[in-house]
Amino acid sequence: MNPVITAFDKGIEKSGIEPSRVCVASDIPFEPEVVNYLGIDFFHTTRGRSIAFGTGLKLGNPALKVVPFVGDLMTIGGNHFVHAGRRNMGLLVICVNNFVYRKIGGQPTPSVSITFSPYSTFEEPFNIPHLANSCGAAYTARWTALHTDELTNSIAEALGKQGFSVIEILSPGPNYYKGIKEIESNVINFYYENSVIKNGEDPRNVGINPEEKIVVGKFTDKKRPTFIDSYNTQLTKVLGDKFIPYGGKSG
Amino acid sequence: MSPIINGFPRLRGLKMKADPRDVNTGVYYIDGDVAAGQGALAAGCKFIGGYPITPSTEAAEAFARVAPLAGAMFIQMEDELASIASVVGASWAGVKSMTITSGPGYSLMMETIGFGAMLETPFVLLNIQRGGPSTGVPTRTGQADMMQSRWGSHGDYEIIAISPDSPQEMFDYTIKAFNLAERYRCPVMIMSDECVGHMTERVVIPPPDEIEVEPRRFYDGQINEYLPFKPDENLVPRMVKAGDGYKLYITGLIHDERGYPVKNEEYKSIYTKRLVDKIRLNKDKIIEIKEEETDDAEIVVVSYGISSRVAVRGIEKAREKGIKVGSLRLVTVWPFPDKKIAELSKTVKAFVIPEINYGQIAFEVERCSYGEANIVLIPHGGAGVHTPDDIFHAIEYAAKEKKRIEGIIEYKTKLEKLIFEEGFKLYE
Amino acid sequence: MGPLKTIESKEVHPMDNLLRMDRIPHIWCPGCGIGLAVNAFATALEKAKIDLDNVCIVSGIGCTGRVAGYVKLDSFHTTHGRAIAFATGIKLGNPKLKVVVFSGDGDLISIGGNHFIHAARRNIDMLVICVNNFIYAMTGGQVAPTTPLTAYATTSPYGCVEPPFNIPYIADSSGAVYVARWTALHIRRLTNSITEALNKSGFSVVEVISPCAVYYSRINRLGDGLDMMKFYHDNSEIRHWEDTKNLDIGFQTKIIVGKFVDRQRPTYNESYNKWLSEIKGTKDEG
């Protein structure tokens, strides 16, 4: 079983949340055996719309723990990401970032054929924790897929949190949920060895730069009213008793 | 009869009354959009994800005002793509959901409408049609999205489309739309238009026990025996919602009864055929038309939406002149009443179809009449409606025309004659 | 409705060559600030001394989206939210053109949010003038992603429950090279900002806080356009180079204006050309 799914599984266990309450919405199909093993509900959505779909799931039943797993997050789904962050919608976004640099630190990386990554050429990639934080996310972290313990802890923590949490996982390949091939295994080891843990670092400074080591860690952990909390507070203030507060247990 | 069919208990007259919290009983003077918002609430809709677009915003605003008092949620999403995705998500979380849009937004939503149809998600989409294409004329009417509602998304699927013609119908048929969506687990489009949406008329909202709402057909058997896409006797599988321990696997890829993706030819045919048959084989139970004096008619006017309101006066005038004209009003436009048109085409001389477009439902009428009657289309470019005289003169022409003419005969409205024959100066 | 008549005026204003005079009077309401933004833009075009034949203006849908129809340049009134995507195409199709995107907060940040952050990340050479009136005015006063918390709008009839976006912060964190904010009152400083941004290459954002007399200020009982301008006068503070994190706008709170970001980064075209010459010069690696 590959590291990301293992960490996710252990994270759910550690957080103490019932797996049946967890819903994953993703544009990358998980294997049915994986879904059965994890004990969750899985929705394979259209490309880029996992966060919007997840918003619907969360608002339809606020007791659910909705986890959009996104590979193609920041291209087609960028708008949904920044607005969900602004609203502090109760979602845990796990962004599996699979970009591969051609040259890191002057050394050639293992040659992996790049099919469709905008980040491998001359464009600068997004600094996802910084963007998430500036949109208002309550929790931001980044790990490589091999930081299993730290990743498990992050997932457990984020699952227990209300609000919009973003965990970026550096890991190659969207076919990733099946197993790791040899080439991908080289790349993943490369990321792990070239990373440095800096918990609490200002997300502004964690941009991925070919000249430097990759910064990983838990960067921000704030408390902000979630969308449902904000909705209930404002409407109770204006409508008083006539208002029926939305959704029992939010989170 | 056996109480168990295909492993599921037979559904026995499953209806219930509306929740009193959701119904604002009374007599109102409101417009079509607001009536639709009230109708959605009365039907038990608990989630609307919308985005403002003229001329549909009043429906969203009306729902936003009443939702907090009934435990429902309105959220204005960042764009139409997010709106429809959140509506499909909310449906899978177990609540009745709806979105409200118009032409440009409808085009944006098409991918996810197909996604919803593939997942057999019940939801309602209110399209207040406006002048198109593209930005078009946002504040004026049109009826040019009718074919798009049926064929808009890629692939084979079927939907139900309803065309109300008054604010009272906007209220009543929104409730019916939700009921149909639950019964057939498919997207239901309410293809209204700006005229009906912005028309203010008397709307009576009855007491809750006079409103019939169909609850969602949840599965109620053993968890480990549940197959998400195993069809019932009417070809519709029972639904569940996320968070109940079913370990759902829901994907837009073609899937088998467990929901797992499959690629082979056999499954593709089985699944797609069922998606399509679900509506096609139940057509007679879904189609609703209003016929008047078609038994001995020589001309029948086929209309829907605002055009059918205009046609009433045109038909009256024609009858006063002695022409035997009947009226066939399509309340459900899709699935199309092909049998009725085929039956009528044998006895009538011609069908007259007023539409605010350059021919959409007219093509369906032509197809279903199999060459047995003349097809007279009264097209209209939009940003306005026909006049009763246009329809009256077209009926007169259709009655006089003795030859059997192939194809669609376009009968110009007075406005078109003015523009195209007499010349119309746009600006000096 | 009869044929449209043009208004013949006998006197010619010195800036008439920048406006489509045959479409004046415009559709904006009394008390609206968009006209002021257009005024500043027109003056800036003259001050910047650019060849007007090489300037394109692209707008989206909304009240501000109508600007393209009144300015006498190559104008594009595109679909909702896609102005920046459209402008990217124009710029990459003919890099010699100077492209200006002139649109509203709903069009650029709500439905157009994705295009906004990606164009900033890529540093596409264009100037974005975002007129922010905190509401969706053209469609009748619905809530916008910039509507302050607790403010009223037709789709938040009990007050807005979502915290708003801070446009300079988003632009800055996505990588814009020039970010400034002024209100419609600060007309001369706005003109200077636009002039500067027109001469800068890279993704530049100038936000213009504008009154909306018919929806935002009426629904929230803030008076008319002039009352809003008085509010800006009394409550705006100029703080150049302020950290964009601190520029949030609450309901009737202080508005911080100024020039916040002015830096250099290779534009998309420059990076592309450099990359192209690199791969042409070296052997293909994989």
Image: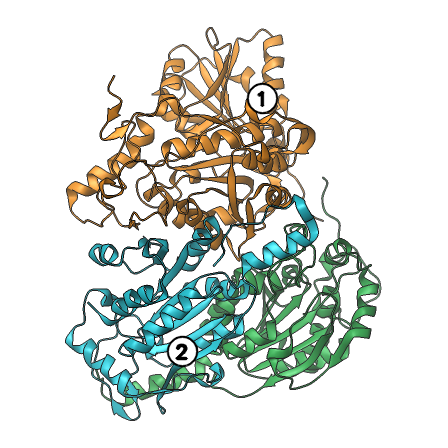
Chain colours: A cyan, B orange, C green
Give the CA distance from mark 2 to mark 1: 59 Å
Q: Residue B146: where, in percent of width, then height?
A: 46, 36
Q: Quadrant of residue A146?
A: bottom left
User: Subunit of mark 2?
Assistant: A
Q: Is C169 or C26 nearer to us in this picture?
A: C169
Q: Is B38 or B101 nearer to us in this picture?
A: B38
Residue found at the far front of this picture: A16
Q: Which residue is mark 1?
A: B311
Q: Is A213 or B410 nearer to us in this picture?
A: A213
Q: Is residue C198 left or right of residue C29?
A: left
Q: Is residue C270 above or below residue B318?
A: below
Q: Residue B256: where, in percent of width, then height?
A: 21, 44
Q: Residues within 10 Å of mark 2 (few under 14, many from 20)?
A: some
Q: Is residue A21 above or below residue A73?
A: above
Q: What residue appears at the point 75 percent right and 63 percent down from the top-left corner?
A: C211
Q: Which residue is mark 2?
A: A125
Tell me which amino acid carries mark 1.
Ala
Q: Residue A38: where, in percent of width, then height?
A: 26, 59
Q: Is residue B377 left or right of residue A100?
A: right
Q: Is residue A167 above or below residue B246?
A: below
Disc 2 and disc 1 in contact, CB within 8 angstroms: no
Q: Residues within 10 Å of mark 1 (few under 14, many from 20)?
A: many
Tell me which amino acid carries mark 2.
Pro
Q: Is residue A42 above or below residue B366?
A: below
Q: Can residue B33 be seen by looking at this rendering? A: yes
Number of numbered discs visible in the structure rendering: 2
Between disc 2 and disc 1, the foreground one is 2
Q: Residue B354: where, in percent of width, then height?
A: 53, 26
Name the quadrant of the N terminus of chain A: bottom left
Q: Quadrant of residue A183?
A: bottom left
